[in-house]
Image (cartoon, coloured by chain):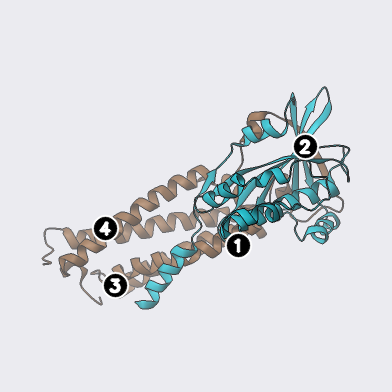
Chain colours: A cyan, B brown
Amino acid sequence: MKTILLGAAAAVLLHITPTVILVKREDAVAKLLPGAERFAARELHLSSADSRRLHDAVGWEPADGVVTFYLGKRQDQVTGVLLFMRVDSQHGPLELAVGYDPGGGGGGGSIRGVEVTKATVETKPWVLEALKAGLTNAYRGLAVGQAPTGAEKVKPHVAAMPGYMAELIDKGVMHADAAFRLLYRP
Amino acid sequence: MLYDLGRSDIRVRWLVTLLLATLGTSYLFGAWMVGLYAGFGTTKVAETYGAAGEAMMMQMPPETTMVTERPISMAEMGEEQHHVDMNLLVQDTHVHMPMYAVIAAVLSVIVLGLAVSRGVGLAIIALLFAAPWLDFAGMWLTKLVSPRFAVVTLAGGWAMALGYTVVAALALWEMWSPRSDGK
């Protein structure tokens, strides 16, 4: 009986809480791809070599081998590029929308902005505290290839768990950055 | 039977009744959630747990990166097809299997107090534990082998519902039917 009770307690403690939407995807798109008249989804089914390049660069590759760039276009010109990135943790997944000024891609360009679109019931207050401390300001204008340092900037002003969330968000931005730098072609 | 649920103390019967009611409610919401995120048909389940998008057609990575581009509306960008990739499935399996085991164990303890033959008891307990195994085996086989294994996940879901319904119906009948003389 003791084992059953301990098992039940462990299961409850380990259970990941439900997902909550912090910013609707449509709102993130409107904010990060402003002025776009049309949109396109560019899906890349990665070869083993490209998956390895990503993995070598940042220790991550998409689990199903697919990276999707969402392009905002005006008069057939790409005005912005957006990626939705998921970051997993033992507290459940976060989802980020990372928008880029294309600037030629393949090494050019810069981050236009980052929105945290999803968290979980448990992580939401931590994420909100990190955001309130100005986390996403640290990414705006960051050149592609430059390491994100949002967590470093907000950690002195927030508690431990919001600081940890900031580290996860840094990681997501770093993954998006590697995908954009290594795989996006205008 | 190891104990007689039908003639047990009213506190035990009350506990079991509330437990069954709570589990039943959570199962109803579980079914609603499955409807929202994965669906009840093999096609939807295969889309949720199989390889992503068009990659379903090619389980192996291509020799060179393949690029496809298609126009998309703002509304479509907002619609996210719920897809469980390998990392999420690892996490789901890790967090859900212990809970499923605890639920199966608790329902099995109820079965031990039912007035059923040893063989029927063994069969119901086997069903209670087989359901989560089928559920997750189906998800993993759909992911790694073929989308056709989505039917195993569906079988797991129905087995879970059947197991709960059988235990709840028998237990409630034995505990609260007029012939029950529990104190």
What chain does mark 1 sit on? B
Q: Please tell me whether mark 3 sits on a helix, a strand or a loop.
A: helix
Q: Residues within 10 Å of mark 1 (few under 14, many from 20)?
A: few
Q: Please tell me whether mark 2 sits on a helix, a strand or a loop.
A: strand
What chain does mark 2 sit on? A
Q: How crowded is mark 3: few (under 14 residues within 10 Å), some or many (20 or more)?
A: some
Task: Tell me the mark number nearer the camera, choosing from 2 and 4.
Answer: 2
Residue at which label 4 appears: B18
> What's the residue type where badge 3 is placed?
Leu
Image x and y of residue A146, in percent: 82, 51
Residue at which label 1 appears: B90
Do the residues bearing badges 4 and 3 touch, measured as CB atoms within 8 Å? no
Task: Tell me the mark number nearer the camera, choosing from 3 and 2.
Answer: 2
Task: Tell me the mark number nearer the camera, choosing from 1 and 2.
Answer: 2
Q: Please tell me whether mark 4 sits on a helix, a strand or a loop.
A: helix
What chain does mark 4 sit on? B
Q: Do labels 4 and 3 share a chain?
A: yes
> What's the residue type where badge 4 is placed?
Leu
Q: Do labels 1 and 4 share a chain?
A: yes
Residue at which label 2 appears: A81
Answer left or right for B26 relative to A178. Answer: left
Image x and y of residue B64, in percent: 87, 51
> What's the residue type where badge 2 is placed?
Val
In which quarter of the view is residue B53 placed? Answer: top right
Residue at which label 3 appears: B112
Q: Distance between the residues labelled 4 and 3?
A: 18 Å
Question: Between B103 and A133, which is closer to the camera in this rendering?
Answer: A133
Q: Do labels 3 and 1 share a chain?
A: yes
